[in-house]
Amino acid sequence: EGGLVAPMPGKVVKILAAAGDAITAGAPLVVLEAMKMEHTVRAPEAGTLRALHVAVGDQVDADHLLAVITP
């Protein structure tokens, strides 16, 4: 619960928030590069970003846990 997962395989090119940040619903958190395009992964709900499980440069598979947000 509260987990934000990668929608597709790709490379993490930007991280736009840090653990402990207050997050609004729809806020951009992670940018993935896949198929030579950038895809922004956004927060599904408001809360606090409790943990990031990726770093810039990481290659991730689809459904890889990127971050945890708690209300």
Image (tube, grey):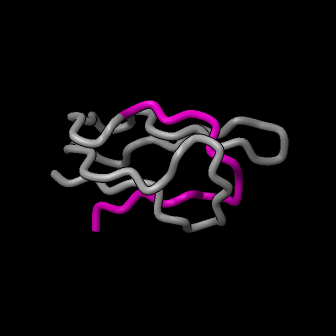
The residue at 39%/54% (across/down) is 67
The residue at 31%/53% (across/down) is 51
Using the image as rendered, state which of residue 12 and residue 57 is in the foreground: 57
The residue at 44%/38% (across/down) is 29
Residue at the limit of the structure toward the right, as seen here: 36
Judge left or right: residue 66 versus residue 56. left
The residue at 76%/47% (across/down) is 34
Quadrant of the snapshot with the N terminus: bottom left
Residue 19 in percent (x, y) is at 28, 42
Residue at the limit of the structure toward the left, as seen here: 71
* Label total for image: 0
Judge left or right: residue 11 versus residue 63. right
* 69 shown above or below 33: below
Residue 69 in percent (x, y) is at 27, 52
Q: Which picture quadrant has residue 26?
A: top left
Residue 30 in percent (x, y) is at 51, 40
Using the image as rendered, state which of residue 42 and residue 48 is in the foreground: 48
Residue 7 in percent (x, y) is at 60, 58
Q: Which picture quadrant has residue 33?
A: top right
Q: Give the range drawn in magenta.
A: 1-17
Judge left or right: residue 35 versus residue 8. right
Based on the picture, tell me whether residue 50 belongs to the magenta stretch: no
